[in-house]
């Protein structure tokens, strides 16, 4: 199969509004996979994305195959992120104004392996530099090794993130709640931060 002709588009804040529903649907599809197992709704995802659209200094990168949105990635100034994200940094005396928080990157399964993950990091790091922010971070959900839904042979993204210069911060954890697929109610999950100082 020939490689698809993919292109990326960089949008700031409300510029992403025309693509709101497409991004929300993409997030729902990808986050239903391991390790998030997210049983979400389009209404919630749309409301969540409004958070980014309302912040002029946020960035949303889109990946397209033709007119179809097949990937998306977000980032927002840390001081505009959810209080749960800010809390671990404030607790240790870091200045949120130095940090760009990377939200989620999602790519449809059939488009993985074409370099979009790396491209999304490049776009967001460039955005951080443009804002004069020397630090970037993101967080990743932690699941038990013996979780029954863990796919056989699953390889986490840790090595990829390390190659890009990010370091896992085991002492920096936040918690968010959502309903897993197959569950009846929401439960809290730990998310561990990864961090990079830009050159």
Image: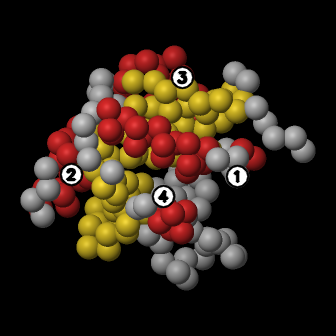
- Disc 2 on helix, strand or loop? helix
Alpha-carbon distance for marks 2 and 3?
27 Å
Above or below for 165 versus 70: below
Alpha-carbon distance for marks 4 and 1?
16 Å
* Residue 8 in view (yes/no): yes
**Where residue 144 sits: x, y (%)?**
48, 78
Please state which of the two labelled residues, at mark 4 or mark 1, is closer to the viewer.
4
Q: Which residue is mark 2?
A: 86
- Disc 3 on helix, strand or loop? helix
Of mark 3 and mark 4, the one earlier in the sequence is 3
Above or below for 35 versus 26: below
Name the residue rendered at 32%, 38% in the picture: 129
Residue situated in front as seen by the camera: 160 or 48 = 160
Alpha-carbon distance for marks 1 and 2?
32 Å
Residue situated in front as seen by the camera: 31 or 87 = 87
* Residue 190 in view (yes/no): no
Q: Quadrant of residue 159?
A: bottom right
Marks 1 and 3 close (CB-CB < 8 Å): no
Alpha-carbon distance for marks 3 and 4?
28 Å
Please state which of the two labelled residues, at mark 1 or mark 3, is closer to the viewer.
1
Q: Which residue is mark 3?
A: 19
Mark 3 neighbour class, 10 Å CA radius: few under 14, some 14 to 19, many 20 or more: few
Of mark 1 and mark 2, the one earlier in the sequence is 2
Q: Which residue is mark 1?
A: 113
Name the residue rendered at 51%, 68% in the picture: 158
Q: Quadrant of residue 150?
A: bottom right
**Where residue 126 sits: x, y (%)?**
40, 38
């Amino acid at each position: 199969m020939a490689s698809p002709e993919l292109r990326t588009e960089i949008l700031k804040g409300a510029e992403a509004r025309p693509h709101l529903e497409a991004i929300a649907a993409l997030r729902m599809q990808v986050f239903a996979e391991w390790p998030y197992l997210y049983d979400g709704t389009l209404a919630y995802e749309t409301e969540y994305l409004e958070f980014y659209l309302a912040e002029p200094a946020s960035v949303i990168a889109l990946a397209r195959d033709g007119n179809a949105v097949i990937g998306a990635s977000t980032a927002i100034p840390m001081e505009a992120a959810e209080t749960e994200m800010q809390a671990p940094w404030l607790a240790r005396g870091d200045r949120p104004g130095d940090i760009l928080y990377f939200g989620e990157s999602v790519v449809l399964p059939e488009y993985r392996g074409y370099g979009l993950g790396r491209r999304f990091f490049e776009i967001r790091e460039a955005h951080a530099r443009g804002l004069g922010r020397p630090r970037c971070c993101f967080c990743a959900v932690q699941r038990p090794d013996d979780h029954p839904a863990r796919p056989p042979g699953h390889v986490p993204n840790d090595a990829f993130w390390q190659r890009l210069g990010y370091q896992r911060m085991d002492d920096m954890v936040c918690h968010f709640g959502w309903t897993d697929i197959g569950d009846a109610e929401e439960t809290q999950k730990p998310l561990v931060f990864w961090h990079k100082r830009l050159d």
